[in-house]
Amino acid sequence: MMNEHTIPTTIRDYPFHQKNDHLSEADAARYGRPTAHVAFYAAITTAADEQNWPTDYHSDLYFHDRRHDGTPCIWILREYGTAIVPIEFESEVAVRSWMGRDNFQWIETFIDLSPQHYHWNGLTLRRITGKQAVDLMRDGRERFNERRRTTLR
């Protein structure tokens, strides 16, 4: 069953998890963070609460994931932690870093180990399959390669 979390336009409209209730639109503006960052964090903490995960490595969710800027990504929720994987690449270094053999195999490993894959498109968090997550990453790499080919012409 695929769940979809549609994010309201303002942070005041969204129920917040008790560990991040001090984040506000004013905080987001003060630190130069777009509202998408706050909406992303609200959506993933809600999804994590629904699963009662992670049971360990809480800093993944409450520290590292909080720093994500709200750009489109794959969010992986595991019993022991979380991971954010970009799907839009701005440089060849980023493509090599995320799509390189070691990282990509690491990500593909989670297809079988973690049933909790989500796609954040900048507005909505939607649960997807592991195969869909890998396909989104590959599509992002292809979009980057196409932009690069067009620029080099």
Image (tube, helix red, strand yellow):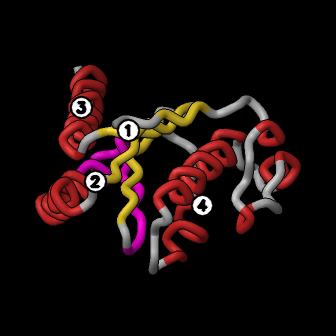
Residue 41 lies left or right of residue 111; in this view the side is right
Task: Give the total number of marks visible in the rendering.
Answer: 4
Asked whether the beta carbons under mark 2 and mark 3 sit within 8 Å of each other, the answer is no
Amino acid identity at mark 4: Arg
Residue 9 picture quarter: top right
Residue 27 lies left or right of residue 83; in this view the side is right
Asked whether the beta carbons under mark 2 and mark 4 sit within 8 Å of each other, the answer is no
What residue is pinned by disc 1?
88
Query: How far from the left and from the top, in percent, is residue 126?
Result: 44, 36
Mark 2–mark 1 distance (CA, rounded to whole Å): 23 Å
What residue is pinned by disc 2?
115
Q: Earlier in the sequence, mark 1 or mark 4?
A: 4
Q: Does the magenta stretch include residue 134?
A: no
Mark 2–mark 4 distance (CA, rounded to whole Å): 24 Å
Disc 3 is placed on an element classified as: helix
Q: Which residue is drawn at 61% across and 61% down?
A: 66
Q: Give whichever of 49, 32 is nearer the camera.
A: 49
Q: From what the image shows, is residue 4 above or below residue 82?
A: above
Between disc 2 and disc 1, the foreground one is 2
Mark 2–mark 3 distance (CA, rounded to whole Å): 21 Å
Label 2, residues with CA under 10 Å away: few <14, some 14-19, many ≥20: some
What segment carries the magenta color?
Answer: 80-95
Q: Earlier in the sequence, mark 2 or mark 3?
A: 2
Between disc 2 and disc 4, the foreground one is 2
| Residue 67: mark | 4
Quadrant location, the N terminus: top left
Amino acid identity at mark 1: Glu
Q: Earlier in the sequence, mark 2 or mark 1?
A: 1
Amino acid identity at mark 2: Pro
Disc 4 is placed on an element classified as: helix
Q: Give whichever of 123, 51 is nearer the camera.
A: 51
